[in-house]
Amino acid sequence: MRSLVRRLPAAGLALISTLALLSAPAAGARSTGEGYSNPVTAGFSADFPDPSMIKGRDGWWYAYSTGGPYAKDGSDGDSYKIARSRDLTHWEKVGPVFDGTNRPTWADPSSGFWAPDIRYLGGRYVLYFTVHNTTTTPDNWDYAIGAATAPTPAGPWTDSGAPVVAPRPAADGGFQWTIDPAEFTDTDGTRYLYWGSYNGGIHAVRLTPDGLKTVGPVTDVARDRFEGPYVVKQGGYYYLFGSSSNCCAGPATGYAVFAGRSKSPLGPFVDRQGASLLASRTGGTPVVASNGNKWVGTGHSSIVTDLAGQQWFAYHAVDRTDPFVTGSNGWLLRPMLLDRLDWIDGWPTVNAGTGPSETSRTAPVTAPLVGPLPADVRVEADLRGSGGVYARRGADGSLVRAVVNARRLVVETVRHGRVIGRREAALAYDAGNVALEVRGNQVTVEASEDRLGDPLAVVSLGLPAGMSRGSAGALGAVDNFSAAALYQPVRRAAPTPYVGKVDSRYSDDFSDGWGSGWTWRNVSPDAVVAGGALTWPTETNDLSSDATAAKASLLLRDQPEGRFVVETKLSLDVGSDTVRNYQQAGLLVYVDDQDWMRLDHVAGGTGRFVEFAKRMRFTPPAAPPIVSFGGAMIGPPAATTWLRLAHDLVPGTGEHRYRAASSTDGKHWVWGAAWTLPAGTTPRIGLVSQGSTAQAEAAYGKASATFDYFRVTR
């Protein structure tokens, strides 16, 4: 980039008299125009789980992942992977984080490294990581979190010398799963570390300014239903992303990402319905889940922003048609996917709620484009000390500029050489990046260390009418200057399944005894229809148990052809906060004892949740057949919970697809994951009440499930 020293308008001299105005043509940025398809790590690595991403100051995007194979046959791998890309959709190998020369001394030689989190803090790169076996205790599986620093995103990496979060003993013995770290810096300069998993839940603690040590007490922010936290600040809220359900069940992996938000980085985090992520009846608004295409197990996410300002969701998933290392039936492959992240009505969702993409999509904006800029524009640059960017908006010299100087962000609008608008904010740390967005008559400027959703400051300023399209440029010594047509946000979510009129041929309101069409598989002597409802105590036989599946009582009926929605209103007296494993009841889709789905209100540990579970036969390529069982969480339950399954046929494959939803009032629904059954099968639909145990019954008795109705709408 050529430098051109040039006088600025007099009103701005006191602020930026030492800065040079860099020449910049009316240039923008664009995508390659070729589109892209998931997984974005295809051709580079067959496995790239738990991805974390950053744009380096060298202009490359970098991604980091848990160790594993590059080759599908498992023949080549690293303990901890680094990749880089120019366009976010084509990746190449950089190498491992640790080798024999820099491995943390407190990591046991047997330990691997999991779940990285990359940041740019205090002028250096910091990588947080999980060690599952340490030398700090004599025990195995004494999980801990460390940090390593480097001058470049490729390394060399130097461990800090000790765990940032040491092994934490669990109340019932062993150690909490002190895994899956994620750092976040608030605008007041406080740094936080989030971590945790199913044994212990998700926690947060303050960090020292260098990000390498903890300070003060630990705060619980989400219960033991979640892992893989990631926090961003958006629109005045702090959003906590967490992955939930089983991570690693092959083609039945139900892993999915949920979110809660708070006005404080330490919570309480609640979902769209106001349900807490710490409650026994656990909340969580779905962000991405399986949708019936080949991708399942969509989880452990991070967020990256392209040059147009569009956020992209990086996460791993499982190809349900080919989930394992070649010739195995348990060594799971989890490549990295990238999809657009939309914010609709204040909540994040992937691809407007349609979930993981399988076919070609418009690629992120990453490449330069020479030409006139539109009125809505995004300009950004990486800073080397003081500097900034500007957008010129008219023939009269009108412009808006954003400058960082002495840890202050100043945003000004200038017309005819006179400053006509000004806002400023203090910065807790040196900014690494400044980004200016103009949309309509509003300018928003963000100063951050690393462009990862935790801005040091956000300043907004109105623009006067009549400022039209123009050019953009940089102020001072900067790197990676870019200008782009500002992304157009998606404002409306994709439609949810249509719910039509009740089809009485397939429905029963239990208003006058048993309706027609029902068939028992093993009659339950305890199920009674009376008072306009079916009451059915939970039984100990359970479809998910090989020992008792054939004995389980199932209430079944034929399902109609084509599209339909089946719904029930269920009251289940399992209360909350007590251990009543695994009393549950709900809707069933049944082919046989090895191929079925159930959407249940479940008591698991002290938690209560709505789970869409699946059991299936599967034959991996070049490996013996297996039976997989997994589940996907939906919305929070209540004492009375409404459940829905929407059925259609997958275009192209003819598979039966069922998408699940739940509600705590019968009016506001949370739509979540979808599962499929093979084409050519003849599923039946019905009800179940099972999963009780001798221990739960000894303490609390059988749970009683009451179904007010079973309705099919079309």
Image (cartoon, rainbow, N blue to C red):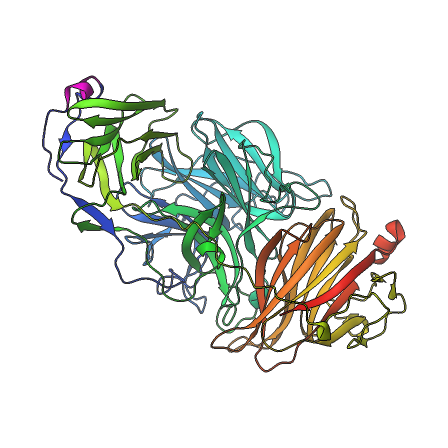
Total numbered labels placed on residues in the image: 0
* Residue 649 position in % (x across, y down): 54, 74
Compared to residue 674, the image places residue 413 above or below, namely above
* Residue 551 position in % (x across, y down): 82, 73
Choose between 110 and 296: the one closer to the eye. 296
Q: Is residue 163 visible?
A: no
Compared to residue 210, the image places residue 559 above or below, namely below
Q: Answer with the quarter of the image where residue 407 lies.
A: top left
Residue lying at the far bottom of the rendered structure? 680
Choose between 297 and 591: the one closer to the eye. 591
Residue lying at the far top of the rendered structure? 14
Question: Seen in the image, is 549 located left or right of residue 50?
Answer: right
Q: Answer with the quarter of the image where residue 223 lies.
A: top right
Whether 139 is among the magenta residues is no
Choose between 302 and 513: the one closer to the eye. 513
- For the C terminus, the image quarter is bottom right
Q: Looking at the magenta stretch, what is its main secondary structure?
A: helix
Stretch in magenta: 9-14
Choose between 138 and 255: the one closer to the eye. 255
Question: Seen in the image, is 213 located left or right of residue 41?
Answer: right
Question: Seen in the image, is 66 located left or right of residue 363?
Answer: right
Q: Is residue 696 visible?
A: yes
- For the N terminus, the image quarter is top left
Question: Seen in the image, is 536 located left or right of residue 53?
Answer: right
Whether 12 is among the magenta residues is yes
